[in-house]
Amino acid sequence: MKQVDITSDNPQPVAHSKPSNIYAIPIAIASVVIIGIFLHFISDAFLTFVAALFLANIFMPLVAFLQKKKVPMVFVILLVLAVVAGVLFGLVIVIASSVSSIIEVIPHYQQRWDQVFLPALSSLLDRIDPDLKQQLTAFNFSSLFQPGKMIAAFSSITNLISSSALILLFMLFILASHGAFRLKIESAFPPRGSFHLKQIVENTEARVRRYLITTLIINTAAALAMTIVLYLFGVDLAILWGMLTFLLMFIPSIGSILAILLPILVAFLQFDQVATPIFLSITVIITQLIIGSYIAPRVMGSSLNLSPLLILISIIFWGWVWGPLGMILAVPITSAMTIIFDHIEPLRPLAILMSAGPKKVKRR
């Protein structure tokens, strides 16, 4: 029976949550944690497919547009393959040219390290940790290119290339079957259920795609700005630092800090005068703040709609699950979870708690 509120002038029935709704949110949170732990142990088998799924989502509008123009799927796949191959070839060229440049500048960095930085840090390290001082004193930049480390790096690059090839293969298969999944949903479920499920899939794809594309635009702008500023100041390896900025910016907050600090530290090692790296630091920080605080919110709009605290927690959690790639995929995965929770009545309060503001999640 419904209870009546007798304290008001117009008695109204008092709504009570169903018992199932009370336990829905903790069960959903526990399920996410358990699934994350499970994915951590099967990451080698599942991570490549997830990465391919998100990468394919970026190319979906291009594939859909070309399909409407009656372009055969074979040519569409070849076009996507050519774009990806061009990007990878460009990365290989930048890395290969940067290695020789790094070897050339190492003696100068070593000299600056021994003559300027170690004497300045000596008294401070004595008070903090004498063992750390001994390790830093014995550090040699040339040791980064020892045969053992070079073999390990080559092995890592080989594994990365093989993983990239598998991701690319999965992505091509996903793009080739574009649109078939929705038809399967219509055939597998009754009209009302299939419509609801299709709505969840379409909303998830749209938000994740919007986030990925806008992130690509913002990261490209940040990388170009970084490269131009470093080049104008004459910093070594400006193109390499720009490329690293593009990749690191995919990790919210943490990546942008690393993208700023790394070239600044190199500038202090490179230049003999302190004024140049100081002016460089100010310019880089201001430039990246303009992109991150002014341009990014206007380009991103409401495509994210996630709590900043939730973003930090998701980066830590998915970073533990899948490593660096998990940190990159943390935000789109969490955004997709928010959409799914918003379409499930008992979990809609959880979607509101996960969002940036309660007004942005519409109740149905």
Image (cartoon, rainbow, N blue to C red):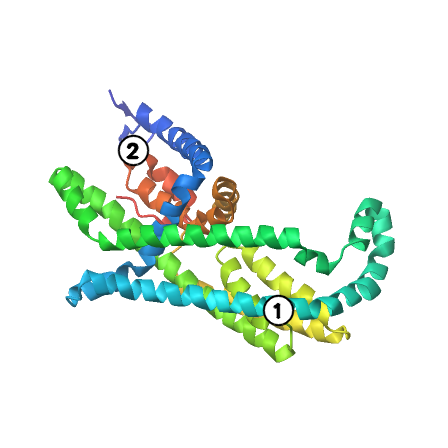
Q: Amino acid type of disc 2? A: Asp
Locate residue 134, reporting x and y percent: 82, 49
- Give, as a three-letter code, the residue at label 1: Ser
Q: Mark 1 points at which residue?
A: 100
Q: Is mark 2 on a helix, strand or loop?
A: loop
Task: Look at 31% across and 25% down and name the residue there.
Answer: 20
Classed neighbour count for the residue bearing mark 2: other residues with Cα under 10 Å, few (<14), some (14–19), many (≥20): few
Q: Where 135 sits versus 216, above or below?
A: above
> Which quadrant is home to the C terminus?
top left
Marked residue nearer the N-terminal end (1 or 2)? 2
25 left or right of 159 in image:
left
Image vertical order of residue 12 relative to residue 85, above or below: above
How many residues crowd mark 1 within 10 Å: few (<14), some (14–19), many (20+)?
few
Is 130 positioned to the left or the right of 213 in the image?
A: right
What numbered label is drawn on residue 9? 2
Residue 41's spot in the image, x, y percent? 46, 34
- Identify the residue shown where x is 16% and y is 68%: 69
**Figure check: 73 above or below 151:** below
